[in-house]
Image (cartoon, helix red, strand yellow):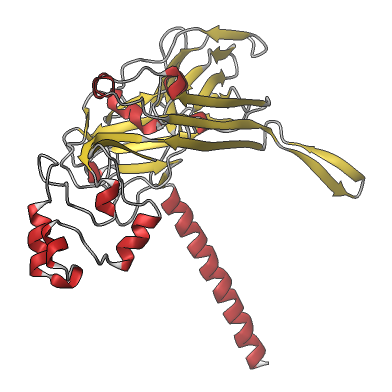
Amino acid sequence: MNEINRRGRSHWQYIILILVMFFTLTSVSKAQESSGKVVGTIVDQSGAVVPGAKVTVVNAGTKISRDTVTDEEGNFQVLSVPVGTYQVSVERTGFKKALTEPQKLNINQTLKFDIGLEVGSQAEVVEVSSAPSLVETANPTLGQTVSERSVVSLPLNGRNVLSLALLQPGVTETNPSNGGAGGFNIAGGRSDSVEYLLDGGLNNNLLSNGVVFNPNPDAVAEFRILENNYTAEYGRNGGGIISVVTKSGTNQFHGSAYDFVRNNAFNANSFFNNKNGTPKEILKRNQYGFTVGGPVYFLRFGEGGKSIYNGKDKLFFFVSYQGQRQVQTQTTSQVTTFTPAELGGNFSLSNVSRTGPDPNVVAFLRANPIYQPNAGLAAQGIIARIDPVAQRYISNNLIPTSPNVTVNLSFE
């Protein structure tokens, strides 16, 4: 019996340990928010505060709502609200129901609504057209938001969404001589001291401190650059914070398909290529993909038989895929190559004027007769023995050659 009791206690200890670890990890995962908050004050027509009013914040796309009640001073706040478009409704006995217009909530933003209630029946609804304050008074963080419209509409070479960070004040390109990770500096900080967040989770490489996963633009709802005066939930790095939030499904199915094309057939040749008689470089790039999102539907089996689970207002999905195919050649400046005769070991016409042997080859063969035992041929710069490895390179056309000695090389 004692053995059974000990086993039972050990099982409970494991369960308690797992629960503690779960809640600890949950609290850590919420340490750096990728959301915002909605705050405000409710007053009556005389300007007196209204305590005990029910405030509901509703996501216009998913209809998911959060409720709270105003305190004794008529204030309310709803924390950790995912980015999106929200409406606020206020109800209190003896007053008409107030409903605000939909307003956009961005990352790390505080939407402040000061709403006045009118005396009347709760069955009556008053639409409040006043917009929230455009001046940030609740959050001291200095930063800028790159909206979904900018992400989708602005041209992006290579579809690197983080390139849009360079459009924000205080963000500059990294000095080319900088050997650290990252492509830009925020507010004068080091490029390898930028903290990257993806949906609130750390997105930094633990070795280089660069970004790990960079979603394609069609999967990004928005991202925000925090430059200074971070609030308490931030602070891992001192060189700025880039917080990216991906899209979510809504009550309506929506999606897209795309193929972004770059092709040298659409391009003119460069000035220097034309000057040197070099054809234009080849670049054939296709970046293609799709997105789809909406409510979740699936078959559910129960006592009443098969039924369909409807995820509207409850459960959503969003999927994004991007692929790339690219063929590219790059032309270098003119380089000196071996002639076909020189690749065969014949340097008899390889001096500067191309009228006699190369004096350096002649000197080498005289100093190392193993490569040409015949003194007469050595004086003409003709090599008898070529390293077998070099011969394999030559036979596989891995060493550039041209009868014109100089050539523009193209590499894929």
- 168 sits to left or right of 67: left
Q: Position of residue 397 (x, y in %)?
A: 38, 51
In the rendered image, the vertical position of residue 120 relative to residue 269, given as above or below: above
Residue 155, percent from left and from top? 40, 20
Tell me if I can see residue 108 in this picture: no
Q: Residue furthest front?
A: 376
What percent of the width, then of the height, locates residue 131?
A: 44, 11
- Which residue ends up furthest to the right in the rendered image? 304
- From this view, report whether residue 119 is shown above or below residue 333: above
- Side of 211 relative to 178 (left or right): right
Q: Nearer the viewer, residue 196 or 395?
A: 395
User: At x 31% / y 26%, what residue is drawn?
Assistant: 278
Say which residue appears at 51% left-offset and 31% top-offset.
287
Residue at the (54%, 36%) spot, across then down: 322
**Taking the image as drawn, is residue 164 in sight?**
yes
In the image, residue 356 sits, relative to residue 245, either above or below, namely below
Left or right: residue 77 versus residue 347 is right
Which of 178 and 192 lies nearest the eye of the viewer?
178
What is the quadrant of the C terminus in the image? top left
Q: Is residue 196 above or below residue 364?
A: above
Give the position of the N terminus as an image quadrant: bottom right
Query: 140 and 389: which one is in front?
Result: 389
Number of marks present in the image shown: 0
For residue 355, what is the image quadrant? top left
Residue 230, x across and y down, in percent: 27, 37
Q: Is residue 211 left or right of residue 62?
A: left
Tell me where residue 244 sits by quadrant. Answer: top left
